[in-house]
DNA sequence: CTGAAAGCGCTAACAA
DNA sequence: TTGTTAGCGCTTTCAG
């Protein structure tokens, strides 16, 4: 076990060499010419004494902390947040970095979010990940600009910071495509009522995909409600009792799909025999546990966290110029996760 | 916006005073006698220059980083993890501390978990929170002992470290009590098959509560399965088709309860009219979204994170002696969350 | 009331 | 091949 009271100096005297030598061998400095015997001795002694470097001192000297700040808007409110953090943490660890996290509320004032960033800056993090929990436009604290930073799951209103977001359109196309592929021609959409990019993009992709398949996308049935289970239930009841009730249903998210399941059951409709359903989000707790398992589209949260971290580190290490990537957000794909809620429509 | 290139020295020359003076006024050192005018001037200049302290340098000098390490076993696999982190983060922020998080796998080798702790120690965190994602016994890395630390949601096999855990027994008693209170006399339990403390404690509390209410706790029906939706479904089918089928059902967790909902539906049983159900965990995504809403017992994850952090900081600041608290784990209560899945049994 | 200077543990020019 | 030394930015003792 390492001893926190042993410094490079102690190792030096114990080994009968200078601190420079110790520093050189322990850091494997390339240009240092040190005899193999000395190297061995230093390493052995360091080991024996349980020496561990003081990263604070190193950082003070080198102006590099090896720490990344992660400010997360509303960390625990959604299970997605954890995936972003996990992706970031693992990518960071793989490159020898650590993560400092600060939670902030999406509804907090700009000043308070700026203070959160400030705390990270005072600790001299090498870069900052700013993660929001919905894919939407955010107003960023200005001091974010003082170190390399990247935005996760949103784009900035100003729009000159590197960002990574999910491919809403591709995901929606995959979802609708799965229904089409199974042979459905009467396809409906249960949409969200919030004015977020996902709402518009998924709707647009829904209509476009149908139209491209030779159906009348503009006339396809759409019902909107709040994107919760209850909203899904209500919207589903409406859409399933329409004249042009669909046999294939694309839901804005898994929660709405869960509501649709209940509505279908109440209307005597069996899934997937009478009604095929596809969701969005792949919230495991819901999607995998509904009966039958819900076919849905997964959001690349882990991947976004990892991507952002990789590129942030590249920028910190001078391997990438983030300003170049800032022109357009990077879009990560949303893969379809097939379970058992889709089948061919009844003839 | 603060300027990362301005140091105390720059403020000093700009204000025409020494760095000592600047340090004294900015830190509001109690014994420093400095004229109000000087104070004002220093503050104004610091503000103008956008001075922000370098916490690394401060830490190096004071041997206090104001950082807490949080090692979290399997951060994102359960939604609970986020609540622990949030509780810890908010408590830390309230006292001027920040959190460094490291994710580790519960199944990782002791050495690898030790290396994770080591990384935190190299960064000279003032204390460490070690959070596991299930309430169980863990084998801790030995180097954890070198700074104040507290265990969240588990107890150590060695058992000489301060720990905070949920009140399994109290929670189970509350759950069963709610069924009893509604008038049920035939109460069953869907238990987990894992050999974790919760499995034993909830079972024991289940039987004891019934017995204390004058029923035959030892004879009460219990079926065990893996604690997932499918397991709950299977166990529920078995228990509900028994000779002594219960009218009130206590489920090991919300996922099993979700399975029980399906089993009940298939057997033509309406919840709560024909069958009252109570869960455990309060996984919002499930409990609040089932129909009818599931009455369940909430695990105090947020509270445990906050409690652990509070006491860890107290220890770091010398206000508490953690070794005294290490004798017995602290137990935080699990409140009953009432929704709509319990009613009186049919006469 | 204010300042000079030592030193926290380390790295990296420069010297030897 | 190895050692001396000057800081990184700050706090704090000790002197004015």
Image: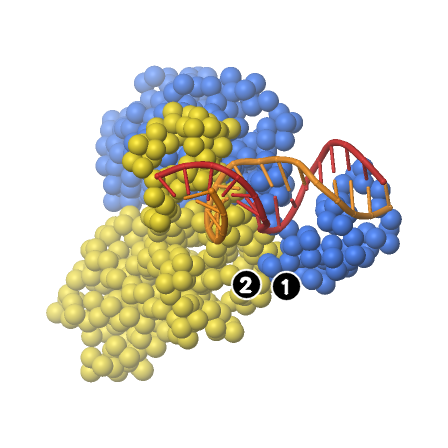
Chain colours: A yellow, B blue, C orange, D red
Are the residues flagged by discs 2 and 1 in contact, CB closer than 8 Å? yes
Residue ranking furthest to the left: A347
Residue, x 83% and y 53% (percent of image)? B38
Quick check: A217 above or below A141? below
Looking at the picture, tell me which residue is in the foreground, B67 or A27. Answer: A27
What chain does badge 2 belong to? A
Q: CA distance from mark 2 to mark 1?
A: 9 Å
Quick check: A85 above or below A182? above
**The quarter of the displayed image where residue B267 is located:** top left
Residue C15 falls left or right of residue A85: right
For disc 2, the marked residue is A146
Residue A273 falls left or right of residue A9: left
Please state the horizontal and vertical placement of residue B250, each as a whole percent of the image: 38, 32
Residue, x 37% and y 39% (percent of image)? A25
Residue B94 falls left or right of residue B89: right
Residue A4 falls left or right of residue B47: left
For disc 1, the marked residue is B1
User: Disc 2 on helix, strand or loop?
Assistant: helix
Circle 1 packing at 10 Å, graded few (<14), some (14-19), many (20+), is some
**The quarter of the displayed image where residue A199 is located:** bottom left
């Amino acid at each position: 076990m390492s001893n926190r009271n042993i410094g490079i100096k102690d190792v030096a005297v114990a080994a009968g060499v200078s601190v420079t030598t110790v520093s050189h061998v322990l850091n494997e400095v390339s240009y240092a010419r040190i005899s193999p015997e000395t190297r061995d001795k230093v390493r052995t002694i360091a080991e024996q004494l349980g020496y561990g470097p003081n990263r604070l001192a190193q950082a003070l000297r080198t102006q590099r902390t090896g720490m990344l700040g992660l400010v997360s808007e509303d960390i625990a409110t959604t299970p997605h947040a954890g995936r972003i953090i996990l992706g970031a943490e693992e990518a960071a660890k793989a490159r020898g970095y650590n993560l400092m996290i600060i939670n902030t509320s999406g509804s907090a004032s700009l000043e308070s979010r700026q203070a959160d960033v400030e705390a990270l800056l005072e600790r001299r993090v090498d870069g900052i990940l700013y993660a929001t929990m919905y894919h939407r436009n955010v107003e960023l604290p200005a001091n974010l600009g003082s170190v390399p930073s990247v935005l996760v799951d949103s784009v900035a209103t100003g729009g000159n910071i590197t960002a990574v977001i999910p491919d809403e359109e591709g995901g929606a196309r995959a979802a609708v495509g799965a229904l089409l592929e199974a042979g459905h021609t009467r396809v409906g959409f249960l949409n969200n009522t919030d004015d977020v990019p996902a709402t518009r993009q998924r709707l647009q992709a829904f209509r476009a995909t149908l139209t491209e398949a030779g159906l009348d996308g503009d006339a396809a049935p759409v019902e909107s409600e709040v994107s919760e289970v209850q909203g899904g239930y209500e919207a589903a009841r409406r859409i399933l009792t329409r004249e042009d009730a669909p046999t294939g249903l694309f839901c804005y998210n898994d929660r709405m799909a869960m509501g649709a399941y209940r509505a279908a059951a109440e209307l005597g409709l069996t899934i997937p025999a009478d009604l095929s359903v596809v969701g969005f989000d792949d919230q495991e707790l819901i999607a995998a546990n509904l009966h039958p398992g819900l076919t849905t589209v997964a959001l690349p949260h882990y991947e976004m966290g990892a991507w952002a971290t990789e590129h942030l580190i590249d920028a910190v290490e001078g391997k990438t110029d983030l300003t170049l990537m800032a022109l357009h957000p990077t879009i990560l794909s949303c893969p379809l996760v097939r379970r058992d809620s889709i089948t061919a429509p009844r003839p």
